[in-house]
Amino acid sequence: MNAFIDAHRARFGAEPICRVLSEHGVQVAPRTYYTAKTRPLSARAVRDAELVETIRAVHTDRSKGRGVAGYRKVWRLLKRDGVEVARCTVGRLMRQEGLHYTERLADAGALASIGTVGDLYDNALAESVIGLYKTECVRLDGPFKTVDGLELATLSWVHWYNTARLHSALGYVPPAEFEGDYYRQINPRQAPLPGQLTVH
């Protein structure tokens, strides 16, 4: 409520706003408003302000969240960076700051683009990857003026997708890390180094 009063106080004054709010069933005394304005921030508010900056940095980082990660992945990225915070807190702060991002392709406008139902190209996995590509690369980095620009953005996205993007199906680790862990488990002495090509 204080934010609303702050937004309109210069034009109408705090007391008239409080009076109108009270007439409409929202009881806010001017004294309560002024007391709240002079009270020091709570420990939670201070921590929230710090976390918002950290969340925003991870969410918008081109090598981490790319501005498209939802709160679950941002929470996992924060954990990987050693930031201890509850998942629900990340969700609350991202919603509060307008950093939410739908995790459903349909809500993001990713439409089916391969083949027709029942033919060889009716492939949900390909549809999902193409939808992610459109959302996380083409829409984010476009519009592109040249084919070269699109190719460079695609190369950057593929590298990020394989080396930095957290995948829930892989336990919230990037594919390259998952693959490296797998090979270290089955053959500890011949495990590939990160970024090293593997022979299957």
Image (cartoon, rainbow, N blue to C red):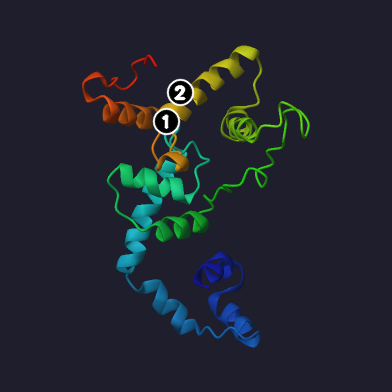
Between residues 139 and 116, which one lies in front from this camera angle? Answer: 116
Mark 2 is surrounded, within 10 Å at the Cα level, by few (under 14), some (14 to 19) or many (20 or more) other residues, namely some
Q: Quadrant of residue 18?
A: bottom right
Q: Is residue 57 left or right of residue 26?
A: left
**Residue placed at 65% from the left, 26% from the top?**
143
Give the residue at mark 2.
Answer: 159
Residue flagged by tag 1: what amino acid is it? Pro
In the image, residue 71 lies at what x, y percent?
Answer: 47, 51
Q: Where on the picture, by quarter, is residue 153?
A: top right
| Residue 130 drawn at (x, y percent) | 63, 30
The numbered mark at residue 111 is none
Q: Badge 1, how many Cα within 10 Å: few under 14, some, many 20+?
A: some
Left/right of residue 99 with respect to residue 107 in the rendered view: left
- C-alpha distance separating marks 1 and 2: 10 Å
Q: Quadrant of the C terminus?
A: top left
Residue at position x 45%, y 50% in the image: 72
Q: Residue furthest left?
A: 189
Q: Nearer the viewer, residue 118 or 146?
A: 118
Q: Which residue is mark 1?
A: 175
Helix, strand or loop status at disc 2? helix
Count the marks: 2
* Residue shown at 50% from the left, 59% from the top: 96
Question: Above or below — where is 185 with respect to 86?
Answer: above
Q: Position of residue 132 (x, y in %)?
A: 59, 34
| Residue 151 horizontal side relative to residue 63, left or right | right
